[in-house]
């Protein structure tokens, strides 16, 4: 009889957001007239911008003409997009990342999970708690639940910033601005992690999906702003939230040429080469029309429109943060990230608060415990709904008898 990867049996019965969707579906069935406001899953509501839409139309027209039709593209991404990314996101900020170090993909969720393909099964993996579920779940899928996984506690006492592990850790996932807590890591704090990784020959997997939402100019937007990081870190970035690409799907991963590791036999191996080999084998590249759309993000008009979109959501975040604080709730995040992390009132646990918020206010959020045990007693709200819905949600919460 064939065998399965029984690591999957060690996962929770359902993905966090699937469970939320089921609860909302059940509530809607019994309350069909309820006006539900969704501040849970981090999906955007503003449409893609005019510059992006125009680029999509032009690319579709190209695909309809024999002379400009495109078939398979390069698995790493088209040069026209990789060059814009390297120039705008890195080189203009004094970071020496080249187009060849950039791999265009269909989403950071995919790449943060798939990166394990090029990493050994005996690595000790450190993951923050609470955390974006994909990091932990994809690690379990690959190596199972074992003493190879270290959970780094993030709580109010440490400002939701993990302490560098005292024990050995070969790989660490960091996400800043953080999902779910909305907190950020200062240049000094991030430098400590880079120094630790260099000293211990460890690898940092740095998810910078929300870097565009940083308002404080002193906060690093890339780990490569830290000296030495190109020798110890892979960075993941996405167009999903800043450019509204959640339904369009485009992202990129940076694997520097300087990032190398030695095998037990002493041979030096390039992670860039391994990831390139993986992508060439398992991925046929992001669609041409989507990459043209992403290229338009870097045009003068596209940059203006993306900035306006990010500002819109951050105004929502500020409104949520201020409204919750006015209610007397303990709140984190929402200043350099589109997520607001709040402490559940009245000693409620995360799912109990979810149920009450849905039943009594008709608002959907995300229970903190869904992000890990240290998230118990907390709750995440997102800034990605419309201004009108966000205002209405805060009005309902402020009128709520807790």
Image (cartoon, rainbow, N blue to C red):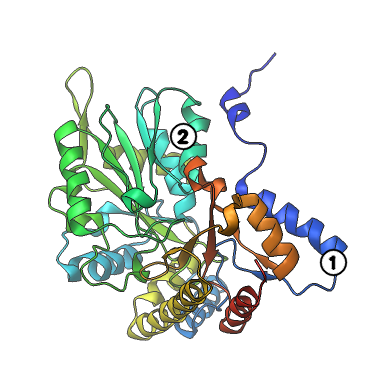
Left or right relative to 247: residue 170: left
Q: Earlier in the sequence, mark 1 or mark 2?
A: 1
Locate residue 283, reporting x and y percent. Answer: 47, 46
Mark 2, residue position: 139
Res. 285 visible in picture = no
Mark 1, residue position: 31
Q: Quadrant of the C terminus?
A: bottom right
- Dot 1 surroundings within 10 Å: few (below 14), some, or many (20 or more)? few
Q: Quadrant of the N terminus?
A: top right
Left or right relative to 191: residue 338: right
**Does 81 appear above or below 235?**
below
Q: Secondary structure at mark 2?
A: helix
Q: Nearer the viewer, mark 1 or mark 2?
A: 1
Q: Residue at x 87, y 62 (%)?
A: 30
Quadrant location of residue 151? top left
Q: Residue at x 46, y 23 (%)?
A: 146
Res. 304 visible in picture = yes
**Does 372 appear above or below 93?**
above
Left or right relative to 90: residue 60: right
Locate residue 169, reporting x and y percent. Answer: 29, 30
Q: Residue at x 54, y 70 (%)?
A: 63
């Amino acid at each position: 009889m064939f065998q399965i990867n029984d690591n999957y049996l060690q996962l929770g019965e359902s993905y966090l957001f699937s469970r939320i969707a089921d609860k909302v579906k059940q509530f809607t069935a019994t309350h069909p007239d309820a006006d539900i406001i969704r501040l849970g899953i981090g999906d955007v509501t503003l449409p893609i911008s005019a510059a992006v839409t125009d680029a999509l139309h032009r690319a579709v027209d190209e695909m309809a003409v024999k002379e400009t039709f495109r078939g398979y593209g390069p698995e790493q991404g088209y040069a026209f997009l990789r060059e814009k990314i390297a120039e705008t996101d890195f080189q203009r900020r004094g970071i020496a990342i080249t187009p060849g170090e950039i791999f265009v993909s269909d989403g950071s969720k995919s790449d943060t999970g798939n990166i394990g393909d090029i990493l050994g099964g005996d690595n000790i993996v450190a993951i923050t708690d609470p955390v974006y579920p994909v990091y932990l779940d994809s690690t379990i899928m690959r190596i199972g639940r074992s003493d190879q996984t270290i959970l780094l506690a993030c709580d109010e006492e440490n400002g939701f910033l993990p302490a560098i592990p005292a024990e050995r850790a070969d790989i660490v996932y960091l996400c800043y601005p953080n999902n779910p807590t909305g907190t950020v890591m200062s240049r000094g704090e991030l430098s400590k992690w880079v120094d630790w990784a260099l000293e211990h020959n460890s690898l940092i997997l740095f998810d910078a999906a929300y870097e565009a939402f940083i308002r404080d100019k002193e906060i690093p937007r890339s780990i490569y702003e830290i000296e030495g990081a190109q020798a110890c870190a892979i960075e993941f970035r996405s167009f999903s939230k800043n450019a509204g690409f959640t339904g369009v799907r485009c992202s990129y991963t940076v694997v520097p040429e300087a990032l190398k590791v030695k095998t037990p036999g002493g041979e030096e191996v390039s992670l860039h080469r391994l990831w390139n080999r993986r992508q060439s084998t398992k991925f046929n590249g992001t669609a041409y029309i989507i990459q043209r759309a992403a290229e338009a993000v870097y045009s003068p008009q596209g940059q203006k429109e993306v900035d306006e979109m990010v500002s819109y959501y951050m105004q929502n975040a500020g409104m949520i943060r201020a409204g919750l604080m006015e209610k007397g709730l303990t709140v984190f995040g929402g200043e350099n990230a589109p997520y607001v992390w709040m402490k559940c009132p009245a000693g409620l646990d995360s799912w109990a608060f979810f149920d009450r918020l849905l039943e009594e206010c008709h608002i959907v959020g995300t229970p903190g415990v869904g992000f890990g045990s240290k998230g118990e007693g907390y709750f995440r709200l997102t800034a990605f709904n419309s201004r009108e819905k966000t205002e209405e949600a805060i009005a309902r919460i402020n009128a709520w008898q807790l």
